[in-house]
Image (spheres, grey):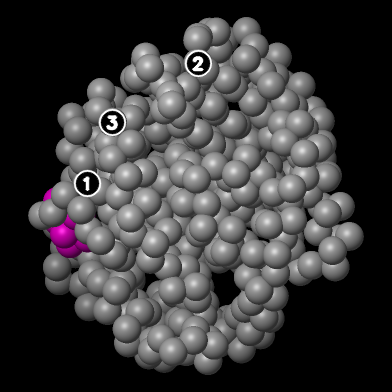
């Protein structure tokens, strides 16, 4: 049987304001500033001749005044013109009709499922739902600011499928971001970071330790971190574990914690890599101001620590076991006491605001997430039988 690869790619768009996504494309600058075309070109360049490649595009938006139908028209018109036809390759779009049908199915089943193409967690969930609907055993999930530069990209992907087929406790595999030279040293550390005593000033140093860990061994069987722009998910994790739409930042790492609720983990393969090249002058350039990202870091670690405590209530897993799995990053932040996180985080946001966030928003959001997690498997199985959903994926090429 001919090898078939399924790849999902979200794009992020905005009109007037953006406070959700790091590297969105402004609709008034589309298609000049979109980055997905270069990724598509690289996928076609490296696709093995004896394989089929199904690519599904989807999109995240920010503004309420942007209609999904408007984006559908723009994307279809653009990619029909620019995407070359190639044997064994299809390009489809998850558009407005698809999202509307998903919303109706969730409401009809009285399930606590949020269907939306706003916020990172919801976009990732749409990627997972594609896998359930297409009944794909293994799915490659990329971001639109990546470029395939390794000629062995799909060969390694095939090896990962074989690996996952024999390791039921592992729900997916992540790959590494590299620079143009193929080096994973993509963390820039300031000279004074080693002297910093504040927890949140040490993040870059901890991330470099993480990269060093991944460089030491080809396969890390239980990875403490994954990079959302390059993952392979199994059908079993797609059907059992959802992303958390309330996580303010780092939804990819948070997904590893969510997987623990179902006793699943991710592996990391260091020779499966992709060029991470976001638009802008530098690797770390972003539409979101640095201070806002720092505030979201403090909030997400408070939220995740509370989530891990919740994990202890509903499973036999102890928090310290999760902290150990998530070393060297983000584990140190999650095992720190709440008071330590709030005190050190006060350099970015007032302690009173962080206490209010922990006491009110965290509890409320966590309750909503747990309801969605408990409904996810039922919803995934239900939509896998919906032929109309599969047919509503709009074929572009």
Work out whether residue 332 can be spotted. no
Task: Kindly report which numbered mark, 1 or 3, lies closer to the viewer in this rendering.
Answer: 3
Q: Which residue is mark 3?
A: 155
Q: CA distance from mark 1 to mark 3?
A: 14 Å
Give how far across and how far down residue 242 sits, in percent: 58, 62
- Work out whether 10 lies above or below 203: above
Give how far across and how far down residue 108 sits, in percent: 89, 60
Q: CA distance from mark 2 to mark 3?
A: 17 Å
At 76% from the left edge and 21% from the top edge, which residue is drawn?
Answer: 73
Which of disc 3 and disc 2 is earlier in sequence? 2
**Circles 2 and 1 in contact, beta carbons < 8 Å:** no
Give how far across and how far down residue 119 sits, in percent: 63, 53
Q: Which residue is mark 1?
A: 270
Label ID, residue 337: none
At 33% from the left edge and 36% from the top edge, which residue is drawn?
Answer: 158
SS state under label 2: loop
In the image, the segment drawn in magenta is 208-215
Task: Kindly report which numbered mark, 2 or 1, lies closer to the viewer in this rendering.
Answer: 2
Q: CA distance from mark 2 to mark 1?
A: 28 Å
Residues packed near mark 2 inside 10 Å, few (<14), some (14 to 19) or many (20 plus):
some
């Amino acid at each position: 049987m001919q090898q078939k690869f399924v790849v999902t790619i979200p794009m992020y768009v905005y009109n007037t304001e953006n406070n959700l996504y790091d590297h969105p494309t402004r609709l008034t600058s589309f298609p000049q500033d979109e980055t997905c075309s270069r990724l598509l070109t690289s996928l076609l360049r490296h696709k093995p001749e004896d394989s089929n490649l199904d690519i599904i595009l989807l999109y995240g938006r920010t503004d309420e005044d942007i209609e999904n139908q408007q984006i559908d028209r723009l994307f279809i018109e653009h990619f029909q013109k620019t995407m070359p036809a190639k044997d064994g390759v299809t390009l489809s779009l998850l558009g407005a009709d698809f999202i509307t049908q998903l919303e109706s199915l969730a409401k009809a089943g009285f399930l606590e499922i949020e269907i939306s193409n706003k916020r990172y967690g919801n976009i990732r969930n749409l990627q997972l739902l594609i896998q359930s609907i297409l009944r794909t055993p293994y799915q490659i999930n990329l971001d639109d600011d990546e470029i395939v530069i390794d000629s062995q990209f799909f060969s390694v992907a095939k090896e990962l499928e074989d690996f996952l087929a024999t390791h039921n406790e592992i729900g997916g595999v992540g790959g590494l971001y590299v620079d143009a030279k193929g080096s994973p040293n993509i963390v820039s550390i300031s000279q004074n970071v080693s002297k910093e005593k504040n927890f949140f000033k040490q993040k870059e140093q901890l991330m470099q330790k993480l990269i060093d860990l991944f460089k030491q061994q080809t396969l890390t069987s239980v990875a403490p971190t994954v990079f959302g722009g390059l993952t392979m998910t199994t059908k079993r994790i797609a059907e059992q574990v959802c992303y958390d739409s309330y996580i303010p930042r780092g939804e990819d790492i948070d997904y590893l914690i969510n997987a623990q609720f179902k006793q699943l983990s991710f592996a990391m393969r260091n020779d499966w890599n992709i060029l991470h090249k976001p638009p802008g002058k530098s690797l770390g350039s972003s539409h979101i101001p640095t201070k806002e990202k720092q505030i979201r870091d403090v909030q997400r670690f408070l939220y995740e620590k509370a989530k891990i405590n919740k994990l202890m209530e509903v499973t036999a897993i102890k928090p310290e076991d999760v902290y150990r799995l998530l070393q060297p990053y983000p584990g140190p932040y999650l095992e720190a006491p709440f008071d330590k996180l709030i005190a050190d985080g006060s350099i970015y946001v007032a302690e009173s605001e962080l206490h209010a966030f922990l006491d009110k928003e965290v509890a409320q959001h966590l309750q909503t997430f747990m309801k969605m997690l408990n409904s996810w498997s039922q919803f995934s199985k239900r939509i896998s039988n919906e032929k109309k959903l599969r047919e509503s994926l709009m074929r572009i090429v």
